[in-house]
Image (cartoon, rainbow, N blue to C red):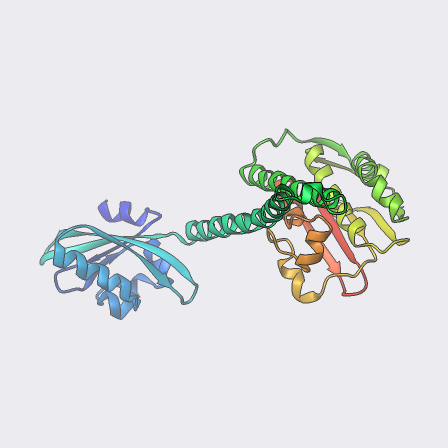
Amino acid sequence: MFEQALNGMKDGVLMVDSTETIIFANRALSAILSLSQAELIGKRPLEAIRLIELAELIAEVRSTGSAASREMKVVYPQEKTLLGSANLIKTDNGPGVAVIVQDISEIKKLENLRQEFVANVSHELKTPLTAIKSYAETLIHGAIDDPINNRPFLEKIEKNAKSLAALIDDTLEISRLESRRGVAPFAPVHLSDEIEQALETLAPRIKEKELEIIKAGEPESCTVSGEAEHIYRALLNLLDNAVKYSPAGGRIELACAQTDRELRLSVKDHGPGIPAEHQPRLFERFYRVDKARSRELGGTGLGLSIVKHIMEIHGGRVELKSTAGQGAEFTLIFPR
């Protein structure tokens, strides 16, 4: 009964006796270490598992007589981070040690992502804040009375303040999407309505650059189940990028295609395109192909990550096709 209970645990359990011989290993431990129970039982921990941190943990508990824990790294056959918690136990031939082994790889991954996110946000916030501080100090120390520079400096402060506000808004949006807060119940969404709303929002810039908008595939007949505001946001982000990177007088193509299994809504521009080496990381938070140009155009580095999160919430995905110098095509793919 006791052995059945241990084999039913999701955490790994390892027991060694007074001779440092493994006398028990449950199924979860075998799965975590990719070793069969036959490869474990009857052997010394270091011989069977070849994990120096585990051997040191067992030795520490024996020498101190107190419970201890330690993180351990496994690199083969798959890289994992494990947490071992050990304590003394009684065995048939003297004092032994029991170790509970947890696979905390996902937890560590999330911790690293959070730390990286905080570091990136801090860096991104610092850039506009430093500019605002610099221009404000210059104005305070006399430039406010300089008719040549005072207005340009104030305009630069305003521009950086807008960048700061956009970055904060996008950061909060990422947080909401990751926690699924504020996601309304799904309902039928007519993509033609969201397309028109996004084009209306971007109309001044489209007109300024004299861009031609081409629609194909009868988008007015395309309907998906989802949250209208988020789908609008995803489409707006893609169209915003297309407008930013399209040459003056160029064209942007919108197309909707449906099958029994999925609906595909694509946004294609004819701008500089995205080099192949950048494409795998393009949907990462704060990743930019050209950091200087992206900031100059008002990008926060979070737009495509927001699109990715929105599509995941809708059970779909976003795909990219692009060749450097030949534009980019982003496609929102919704399940039917």
In the picture, measured across the screen, residue 259 lies left or right of residue 90, that is right
Instruction: Please determine whether, in this image, residue 204 is positioned above or below residue 94.
Output: above
Spot occupied by residue 138 in the image (x, y as percentages of width and height): 63, 46
Instruction: Please determine whether, in this image, residue 1 is positioned above or below residue 91.
Output: above
Residue appearing at x 30%, y 50% in the figure: 7
Can I make out residue 178 in this image? yes
Can I make out residue 315 in this image? no
Q: Quadrant of the N terminus?
A: top left
Residue appearing at x 71%, y 39% in the figure: 233
Residue appearing at x 46%, y 53% in the figure: 112
Q: Quadrant of the C terminus?
A: top right
Viewer-proximal residue among 159 and 112: 159
Viewer-proximal residue among 299 and 64: 299
In the picture, measured across the screen, residue 314 lies left or right of residue 244, that is left
Spot occupied by residue 330 in the image (x, y as percentages of width and height): 75, 52
Instruction: Please determine whether, in this image, residue 75 is positioned above or below residue 308.
Output: below
Spot occupied by residue 105 in the image (x, y as percentages of width and height): 42, 54
In the picture, measured across the screen, residue 41 lies left or right of residue 114, that is left
Viewer-proximal residue among 304 and 260: 304
Spot occupied by residue 203 in the image (x, y as percentages of width and height): 85, 40
